[in-house]
Structure formats: structure tokens, C-alpha cells
Image: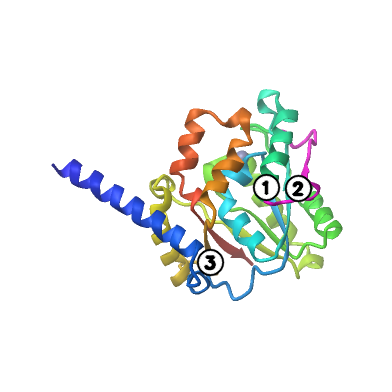
Amino acid sequence: MEWLAIIVTMVVLWVASLFKILHESFSASQVEVLNDGGVFCKRNVLLVIAHPDDESMFFTPTINYLSLRGCNLHILCMSTGNADGIGNIRKEELYLASTVLKVPQKQVKVLDHPDLQDGFGKSWNSKLLSKIIKEEIVNCAIDLVITFDNYGVSGHCNHQDVHQGVRELLQDTSHKEVEVWELVSTSILRKYTGPVDIWLSLLSAKFHLSGVVHCFLNEYPRRSLAAMAQHKSQWVWFRKLFVSFSSYTYVNCLRKID
Ligand SMILES: [Zn+2]
């Protein structure tokens, strides 16, 4: 009986959370819940990721939020994701996903650098990453950078290296005017609670448990699934499950890096 009660509670919580997200998407109260003080409005934003599909699996609440508020979003992907020899296919899939996410393809750059190849155990040099990101900042007049935090959501070493590359950039005083925000990694328990995690995320943002945190609810969760579906080479059953149950499909919390 206890198990039945737990299952019913989870279903009720899931439905209530999904309702909350959809309600916010169509309600004027959204401004109060997600008030960011204009920090993320009309900025020239660079999203730095490691692999094609990172944007669709982890960052869609942020991408949807920013594109709705007049931000000019650029994506810099540090590799083609060639660990299985299908880098060229994955690169094209990222362009297709970007179109679904309303990011112009000409603002998406996918690198294929010999020293930045996809894979566990392949360490990426933070100085090289920093140099590449700096060039992109200058070329696209970027004033806000978003990337992984030091855990990198899934713990993938390439995600963590990208974070270190962006941190390296902050050492350069000539880019002090560029704001940098990281996607906060959550515990494994929270990671697979789907929309239910929005309550904890909103609480953590409200009380700023560590640093300045803003949480974005995904205003178009179905768009996230549609974007991920463009990554056909990756769209296998367990990723379909991951994207449906992952809290990152429904909410992103960004923390400012000083
Ligand atoms: Zn990745």
C-alpha cells in the first residue's frame, strides 16, 4: 500500500508541476516568478557547449527564455562529437536542432579542432578553449556567456573542460565587461524528477543559496523534445526517456560566475 501511495503522490506532483510550467507559459504572472531584473534581456549571448545535443538535452529552458526576450543567441560547440566517427552527421543535426530552437544557423559554430576531440579521457586545454571563446566574443560582440558549471551536468570531462576554459577567460581583465553564467548541476535524485524539480529550483533561486541564481522554466517543453529529435543519431530509446524525465528539460538554474 505504501508503494501505491508513493506512486500516486509522484503522479500528482508530476501533473501539478507540469501544470505550473504550462500555466506560467501562458500567464502574465510569469514576469513575477521569473523576474530577472532585465539581466537577460536583449543581450548578445554566447552559449558554449562541448558536443552537438548538449544544447537540446540541457539548455533548452534557457534558450527558449532568452529568445523570447529579444536576446541574440550564438552557440559555440567545441567539437563535432566524433567519438563514434559520425561527427559530420552530428554537426548537421545541431544546425537542424538550432532551427527548431529559433537560433539562426549562421550563429551556430561547430569546431573540429584536432586538440578538442570528443571522448572520455581526452583532456581539453583550458588556455586553448579560452583563446577560441575570446575570439568569438570579439567577433560577435558578445556581452554574456553561458556554459556548464564545474561538474558539467553529466560529469562528462569535456563539459568540465569547457567550464574551465570559460573560467580561464575570466582571468583576462580585457573582458571584464562580459558576464558569465553557469548551468547549476543538480544531484542525481533531482536530475530525474522531470518537472517536479521546478519547486526546489525556484526555492534555491529565491533564497540565493550560493551566489546570484536565476531559474528559467521551460516555456516550450515540447520544443525541447522536437529539438532533441533532430539529433537522429542520438535519438535512441534511453535518450528519449532521459529527455522526458530530466529536470533540465523543464527548468534551468543559472549561477553568475564572478
Ligand atoms: Zn555533451
Q: Which marked residue is nearer to the observer: mark 2 or mark 3?
A: 3
Which stretch appears magenta?
A: 102-117
Q: Amino acid at mark 3?
A: Val
Quadrant where the C terminus is found in the figure: bottom right
Q: Point out which mark residue 162 bears.
A: 1
**Is residue 110 on the magenta stretch?**
yes
Residue at image position (78%, 50%) is 107
Check disc 3 and report the residue beneath it. 213
In what quadrant does ligand 1 lie? top right
| Crowdedness near tag 1: few (<14), some (14–19) or many (≥20) residues, C-alpha within 10 Å | many
Asked if 11 appears above or below 120 in the picture, the reply is: below
Looking at the image, tell me whether mark 3 or mark 1 is earlier in sequence order: 1
Residue 86 at x, y = what percent?
70, 25
Q: Are marks 2 and 3 in contact (CB under 8 Å)?
A: no
Label 2 or label 3, whichever comes before in sequence order:
2
In the image, what residue type sits under mark 2? Leu
Looking at the image, tell me whether mark 1 or mark 2 is earlier in sequence order.
2
> Percent from the top left, x then y, of residue 247?
46, 49
Q: Are marks 1 and 2 in contact (CB under 8 Å)?
A: yes
User: Within 8 Å of ligand 1, the CB of disc 1?
Assistant: no
